[in-house]
Image: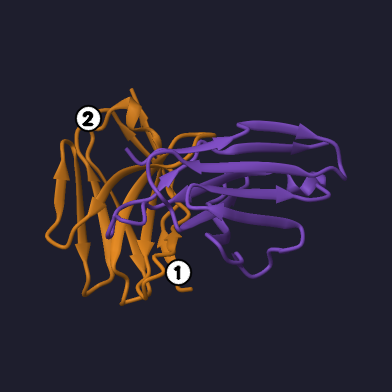
Chain colours: A purple, B orange
Amino acid sequence: GAVVSQHPSWVICKSGTSVKIECRSLDFQATTMFWYRQFPKQSLMLMATSNEGSKATYEQGVEKDKFLINHASLTLSTLTVTSAHPEDSSFYICSARPTARGFGGYTFGSGTRLTVV
Amino acid sequence: RKEVEQDPGPFNVPEGATVAFNCTYSNSASQSFFWYRQDCRKEPKLLMSVYSSGNEDGRFTAQLNRASQYISLLIRDSKLSDSATYLCVVNESGGSYIPTFGRGTSLIVHP
């Protein structure tokens, strides 16, 4: 149980275009989902906390107008990288914790490797 | 948000060795703790939760020391397949359950 599906797994796009990444909880409901970014040989950096039915909470230094987050249902959150630039190339991972679970662990999506050329 | 710190390593050990990692956290009100494993270019996967009384899963033992604010992971009889990055995750209190990740400890098990 507790499966999180993330797609696409990888995407290559041109500078200036927008890319949407989807994160779905397949067998549980998630009021909150998290979006991370990981550069090579670096740790996971939390970008934002996605809250169902309300605005996302962004970490300091993350541009909310550039990284648009929509959490329209209890099973889906999307991250849109707008006007992508080569420096946005990274590994983006979402995670969620079942709402009904107490102190249970987090399940991660398989990640999206974004390359902006 | 307070920090979670880990020695990035790498820890380079031979097969069969016992290796231990520590992770310190600064928020004394932290509620729950986990160890995740991340293979190269893959997403992190839950290895084990860390309970106050300590817990063991096969060759892996996790312990929590609230007084000194650290958790540990002990791997016995290391296998080549244990080579990975081990991430410490701490859940802050307050109901938001926002996980804070350590930067990970790299383990390399060699023949």
**Is the residue at mark 1 from the same chain as the one at mark 2?**
yes
Q: Nearer the viewer, residue B47 or B84?
A: B47
| Residue that mark 2 sits on | B16
Residue found at x 65% / y 31%: A10
Q: Left or right: A82 with respect to A30?
A: right
Residue found at x 80% / y 47%: A84
Q: What element carries label 1?
A: loop
Q: x%, y% of residue B73?
A: 26, 50
**Which mark is first along the chain, 2 or 1?**
1
> Splitting the image into 4 quarters, where does residue B95 fall?
bottom left
| Residue that mark 1 sits on | B3
Residue closest to the far left: B53
Q: Chain letter of disc 1?
A: B
Q: Please say if A98 is above or below A115.
A: below
How crowded pointer 1 is (Cα within 10 Å; few <14, some 14-19, many 20+) is rated as few
Q: x%, y% of residue A92?
A: 61, 45
Q: Distance of mark 1 from mark 2, alpha carbons? A: 32 Å
Q: x%, y% of residue A71?
A: 58, 55
